[in-house]
Amino acid sequence: MRDGLRGLTTRGRSFLAAAVAAAISAAILGEKDLLRVAVLLAILPLLAAAYVGRSRYKLACNRSLEPHRVPVGASSRVVLRLQNLSRLPTGTLLLEDRLPYALGSRPRVVLERLGAHQASSVAYTVRADVRGRYEVGPLVIRLTDPFGLCELSRAFPSTDHLTVIPQVTPLPSVRLPGEYAGSGDSRARSVAVHGEDDAATREYRMGDDLRRVHWKSTARTGELMVRREEQPWESRATVLLDTRAYGHRGDGPTASFEWAVSAAASIAVHLRQAGYKLRLVTGDGADVDATEAGGEGLLLDHLAQVHLDKRGDITSLVQQVRQRADGGLIIALFGALNTAEAELLAGLRGNGATCVGFLLDSTTWLNLPAKARAEAEHAHAAAALALLQSGWRVIGVEHGNRLPVLWPQAGRGSQGFALRAAMAETVAGGMR
């Protein structure tokens, strides 16, 4: 009741003022009929305040997002279903759903009166041009009585989340240098070997069954070894995303980092659909296993929230990948590198891994003077050369390049690598 009195509108307060004036006039003039009018004028806003004040327990709200995960630039439909649980009709309801700035202005929807136990639904759309995970809600409702004497705001505590994922671009099928393959000619095979003396072995890992320990290999190597028997053919791939803040340029959705994030999402989805056991590693410390059911959604949800790391460096990135290094295909999206950082990446080629790097010349996302542009191109070429010499396959990326056009260069036997190596040698010779 107290909340209802605080919510009296100007009309409701005017009714109370008129009731007081009528009561005083009735007392002075001795008019009983005027006193009855004063009582009536006072009862109306009090009843309205009591009616609106108890409505907070008589409304139920449900929100649904269709869909709850959308790519950048796409729209999602938000459906609000409001139900009147009481036996009394409501007045006109003004609904306002709270949204973050990135999703646009707060929608305001007018809902006509709801009858007893009646339900009604309203919908609106939201759209985001920046990836991320956004909170939708809570819903705020303005309740009024049929006479407009009292108005009260109520908020439902429930919220939902909209995940805006990077844009995923379909990629053409190419023959990749696969490792530990399942089916397919482009994948190397991990063959099951039978026999005690010639069993394929590997180092013991925490959690391995001790019954699989191969004692002859253990005695020969001095380390605990286990059999790799009856292993299914499989393909393994690691997608590596460089999040160093000083390696990227540009702002907003058109920054070089956003190109790299979208490319990482596109490559990861493409490889997973091709049957690879997939792992996503980002420079901010995340390590996502996207092999199991629902792995694609988990991967995209993480890429929706990944951000630049001002303290990131190549050394920690290499160490993070090597913590679970088990061979396979490594496809990396790098920002600008210097030669020392490129040489450190040679450490990822251990255990038979094949490494393919998309090296972004992030300075092309800026407008530089001619001299600064030439220096940036020389630095980019030197880093590409250092990667090539350490055994990486390098694909240069400039502003405006499209991933589906570059993707075939990641395939086996691409002639572009030799050409790029020759160009890098020429540029490096000119610098000397």
Image (tube, rainbow, N blue to C red):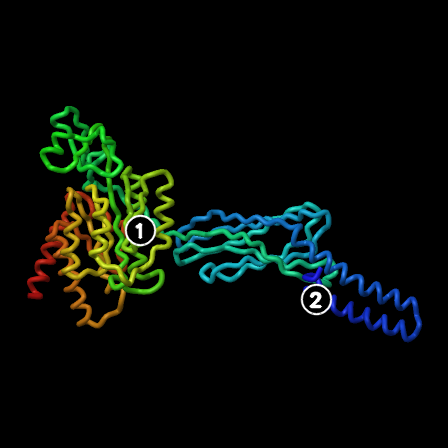
- Residue identified by numbered label 1: 286
194, above or below 409, in the image: above
Sooner in the amino-acid sequence: mark 1 or mark 2? 2
Counting from the top left corner in percent of width and height, residue 134 is at 45, 55
Q: Secondary structure at mark 2?
A: loop
Task: Name which quarter of the figure residue 220 lies in.
Answer: top left
In the image, taking residue 215 as reference, residue 146 lies left or right, namely right
**Count of marks overlaid on the render:** 2
Q: Which of the two discs, 1 and 2, sits closer to the camera?
A: 1
Name which residue lies at 84% across and 67% down: 38
Q: Residues within 10 Å of mark 1 (few under 14, many from 20)?
A: some
Q: Secondary structure at mark 1?
A: loop
Residue at 23% over, 42% down: 174
Q: Residue at x 47, y 47 (%)?
A: 67
Residue 245 drawn at (x, y percent): 28, 62
Q: Extreme bottom residue here?
A: 28
Quadrant of the snapshot with the N terminus: bottom right
Mark 2: few/some/many CA within 10 Å (<14, 14-19, 20+): some
In the visual, does 115 lie left or right of 156? right
Residue at x-position 12% and y-position 49% = 391
Q: Amino acid at mark 1?
A: Ala
Outermost top residue: 195
Q: Position of residue 330 (x, y in %)?
A: 21, 46
Q: Is residue 389 above or below residue 42?
A: above
In three-dimensional space, the C-alpha distance between marks 1 and 2, rounded to whole angstroms, equals: 54 Å
Three-letter residue code for mark 2: Thr
Residue 354 appears in the rendering:
yes
Where 35 sits versus 176, above or below? below
Q: Horizontal and vertical percent for residue 280?
A: 29, 47
Q: What residue sits right under mark 2 in the picture?
A: 9
Taking depth in this image into account, of 107 and 347 the one nearest to the observer is: 347
User: Which mark, by number, is residue 422?
Assistant: none
